[in-house]
Amino acid sequence: MTIGTLDITERQFSVEEWLEFEKQAEVRHEYYYGKLIPMPGEAKKTNRISKTLVKLMDDHLLEQGYEAFYLDVKAEVLPNGIYRYPGMVVAPISDNEHEYIVKQPIMLVEVASEDSSYRDRVKKRKEYFKIPSLRYYLIISQDDVWIELHVKLDDGSWTTRYYTEMEDVIELEKFNLKLDVASIYKYAKG
């Protein structure tokens, strides 16, 4: 399927067409109600933070029946409507319905830059909070020690915790896991 840049902005895509297009696209695109949104390349700092978080959590998550993905794995936010590329997504190991898409995210992570901060903290947060399976939304600033953890409570409401010191410890009760903020930022600067 050969599609020019102009065609991308002018036409509606089905989810299946988007998935096929993504397999050969040089730039990733999020899917938003049939429109493709180009994703800028990730800064090294952003990638280091995501990779470090996966390394810190992966073995423990697998023992608990969950799996962590980053880079090119997509998260279904709204079936047939919104699909995103989060910095990291955690899902049950049993979420294997689709090869490229996580359909039951339990945790979504975005590493926010100055350019993406509003989108991650406002627009995506509104979208993500509507995902029935989601329990955690973690936003990590790539430039400052600033982490927001949004936690879904048993009654369906959300609460937010902030971590702004390297000595802080993030507790993810559902996974029986604690993360040191210093460990998350350990390799951020390279």
Image: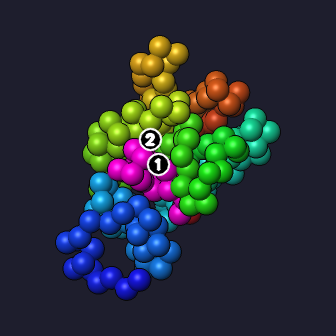
**Residue 184 appears in the picture as rendered:** no
Q: Is residue 21 above or below residue 33?
A: below
Q: Which residue is mark 2?
A: 139
**Residue 134 appears in the picture as rendered:** yes
Residue mark closest to the camera, 2 vs 1: 1
Q: Nearer the viewer, residue 22 or 41?
A: 22
Q: Mark 1 and mark 2 in contact (Cβ < 8 Å)?
A: no
Quarter of the picture containing the C terminus is bottom right
Question: Which amino acid does the dot numbered 2 rest on?
Answer: Ile
Residue that lies at the very extreme toward the top in this rendered image: 155
- Residue at point 48%, 24% (across, down): 152
Q: Is residue 19 above or below residue 51?
A: below
The segment highlighted magenta reads: 71-88
- Residue at point 56%, 41% (across, down): 104
In this rendering, position of residue 126 left or right of residue 66: left
In this rendering, position of residue 50 left or right of residue 115: right
Q: Secondary structure at mark 2?
A: strand
**153 in magenta:** no
Q: How many marks?
A: 2
Label disc, if present, on residue 76 of the rendered structure: 1
Q: Is residue 29 above or below residue 24?
A: above
From the top left corner, tell me how far across and down residue 84 is, in percent: 42, 53
From the top left corner, tell me how far across and down residue 1 is, in percent: 41, 83
- Residue at point 46%, 48% (across, down): 76
Point out the tag, 2 or 1, that comes first from the N-terminus. Answer: 1
Q: Badge 2, how many Cα within 10 Å: few under 14, some, many 20+?
A: many
From the top left corner, tell me how far across and down residue 137 is, in percent: 47, 36
Q: Badge 1, how many Cα within 10 Å: few under 14, some, many 20+?
A: some
Colouring scheme, one of rainbow, by chain, secondary structure, one colour: rainbow
Q: CA distance from mark 2 to mark 1?
A: 18 Å
